[in-house]
Image: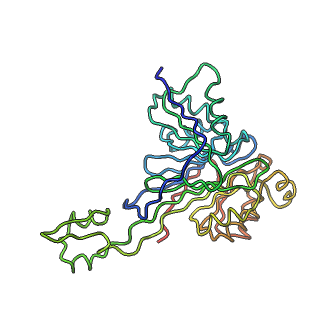
Amino acid sequence: MQSCFIDFSITCKPLERLKLSFPFHIHVKIVFLGTGGSWPSPQRNVLSIAVKREKEIILFDCGEGTQRQFMLSSLSFMQTKKVLISHFHGDHFLGLPGMIQSMTLNDREDELELFGPEGTAELVKILLELGYFNPGFPVTVKDIEPGTVLGFEHYTITAYQAKHNVPCLGYCIEEKDRAGRFNLEKAKELGIPEGPLYRRLQSGEDVKVGDKIFTPEMVLGPPRKGRKIVYSGDTLPSSETVQIAKDCDVLIHDATADSSVEEKANRYGHSTARQAAKIAKECKAKVLFLVHVSPRYEDATPLVAEAKEEFENSILAEDFMEYDVRFNE
């Protein structure tokens, strides 16, 4: 079997954020692979939520059975590039060894990046040493802390402090600002010939016509905001979530129970559906998805009913539900 490089780094330095991102349109969709909490039920698998950007999948948590949920969905686990673990309760990470072994058996060669709270590197090292098995591809693991910003080509991932009964991180994926709209009239006024040069300017390139140089700033409007997706992890209602999720396009929030058992849910570090909806309303989210539904609910419609009383655009996430994240123009 191919040898494996495993980098169990303990720190992660933020990368510098670029001002603009120039892709024309990157399709982003969320696929809810598992939406339940604590243990799998006939209705729901435990937590795992995939964010697909073109050919890349970013995975929020990886509860047991995630690899099979992938197989029953429209996605392939082989496209998973990054996994963001919120905390070390089993329903959020026990799917990792099985998924990594399946990736190896399917001849994966691409690197897999894992991020999580302090102790993630040590935990993954133990998981990958279980039994007669070695990953056949590079696995890089980094411990991160609240406030860490991971910078990538077209987006950043920010970790923040969730309010659970064990150390737990929430995550915010935010695309970098996009280039402004192309001003066709301005381009014609400047004498730039129609055709491929327009597309090059929209892509952020300078173009030359005769002895004149034209830059994108000459024909593009003000930058436009990228999309923003926030995952709360397991958490009580918190000001940290409100702050980081301000004006987000999608908020995926712990909604373990209904308000009749609020005291018990809060005691174990979880929110009710109503509390999640109040957070969504306060941070002015565009849409709220309720997840981590307790297995006590064979019918979870009461949760979405009470959430909608606080925040109309509340959706009860179901396993294999898909949601296209559109630009807020």
227 w.r.t. 52: above or below: below
In front: 277, or 69?
277
Point 66% across, 64% down: residue: 314
State left or right for residue 59 relative to residue 221: right
State left or right for residue 8 relative to residue 92: left
Q: Where is residue 136 in the image (x, y as percent from the top left)?
A: 49, 26
Q: Position of residue 175 (x, y in %)?
A: 49, 60
In front: 314, or 301?
314
Q: Position of residue 171 (x, y in %)?
A: 61, 54
State left or right for residue 102 relative to residue 147: left
Q: Residue furthest left?
A: 210
Q: In which quarter of the image is residue 286?
A: bottom right
One can see residue 124 in this view: yes
Q: Where is residue 158 in the image (x, y as percent from the top left)?
A: 58, 56
State left or right for residue 38 relative to residue 261: left
One can see residue 41 in this view: no
Point 45% across, 65% down: residue: 177
Q: Quadrant of residue 215?
A: bottom left
In front: 135, or 148?
148
